[in-house]
Image: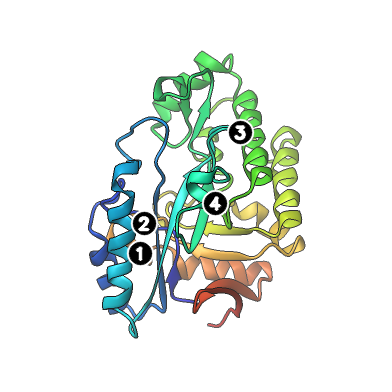
Amino acid sequence: MQLSNYHSHCTFCDGRSTPEDFIKFAVSHSFRAYGFSSHSPLPFETFWNMSKDDMPEYLMEIERLKKKYAGQLEIYVGLEIDYLDETYNASIPYFRELPLDYRIGSIHFLPIALPLEEENMVCIDGSFSDYKDSVEKYYGADIRKLVAHYFSSTLKMIEAGGIDIVGHMDKIYMNGHKCEGFSLDADWYRKPLNDCLELIAEKGLMVEVNTKNLLKKQQIYPHINYLSRLRELNIPVMVNSDCHYPDLVNDGRTEAFELLKQTGFKTTRELINGKWEDVGITN
């Protein structure tokens, strides 16, 4: 089982501890590689995203840790970059020009009006009560319309490029499954998700198996029902914990690797000496 993690949040965004605390956990648990992926700056300020003003310090701190722990742990610096629309996503010059080792593309916000400000966003990753209010207010109480908007944005994100990894690609079901009329098996859900997977395969991108809610909510992203489709399409995967606390760095890893083996995966994608490689899954 590969001991690595490339999706991680520290005090530069909404993580609850310093970068070095996460590294100390990784070293003490014999990790081979560790990557930081703070929530990227946005056109508006939120409590959970980095500020552009903090970017130089973020890059310098991870570089310091790379040097300090050289020989003990491979350390990488990345970002989790939100796709908002064609004007703000991982493909714009600001993100392309940053000296990052990798970029995760994710959807947390869906714009429902301009300008790109927080009050004009539907957040799909917050509380269920807020999520439900958004479905009722902006989508006519029809969960299918929110799902369609989400996967449409995901397709546009994949097409826009600038990313290496698609993050928690179907997290829309985290709150969505509690809404009336939701169905993971309905054509209106399955088809747009499959369209995203086929485009991911075409573009040669990776998909993370996100374990953040695996033990807490028995949810994994992508949903367990769709792991076999990733394998059929030969989409490379990795196991990431999306941790915000050091003691959750390894959360759900064993269970996720067991699911991958049961689904027929033979390898996961790993950064080794700065290059992505396929590594065989072992017990």
Q: Which mark is residue 249?
A: 1
Q: Which mark is residue 160?
A: none
What amino acid is found at the position of numbered circle 4 in the picture? Tyr
Q: Nearer the viewer, mark 1 or mark 3?
A: 3
Mark toward the start of the polypeptide (2 vs 4): 4
* Residue hosting label 3: 86
Q: Nearer the viewer, mark 2 or mark 4?
A: 2
Give the percent coordinates (x, y) of residue 172: 55, 38
- Whole-Å distance between the Cαs marked 2 and 4? 14 Å
User: Where does label 4 land, which residue?
Assistant: 221
Q: Between disc 3 and disc 4, whose residue precedes?
A: 3
Q: Is residue 1 left or right of residue 129?
A: right
Determine the CA span between mark 2 and mark 3: 29 Å
Of marks 3 and 4, the one in the foreground: 3
Which residue shows up at 65% across the image and 43% down it?
A: 160
Rounded to the nearest whole Å, what is the CA distance between mark 4 and mark 1?
Answer: 16 Å
Q: Residue 130 location, x and y as percent?
A: 41, 25
**Is 170 placed above or below 240 here?**
above
Q: Which is more toward the observer, 283 or 202?
A: 202
Determine whether label 2 and label 1 are within 8 Å by CB: yes
Q: Residues within 10 Å of mark 2 (few under 14, many from 20)?
A: many
Mark 2 in CB contact with mark 4 (< 8 angstroms): no
- Disc on the earlier residue, 2 or 1: 2
Identify which amino acid the numbered label 2 is placed on: Cys
Coordinates of residue 137 in the picture (x, y in percent) = 50, 14
Label 1 neighbour load within 10 Å: few <14, some 14-19, many 20+: many
From the image, tell me which residue sits under label 2: 243
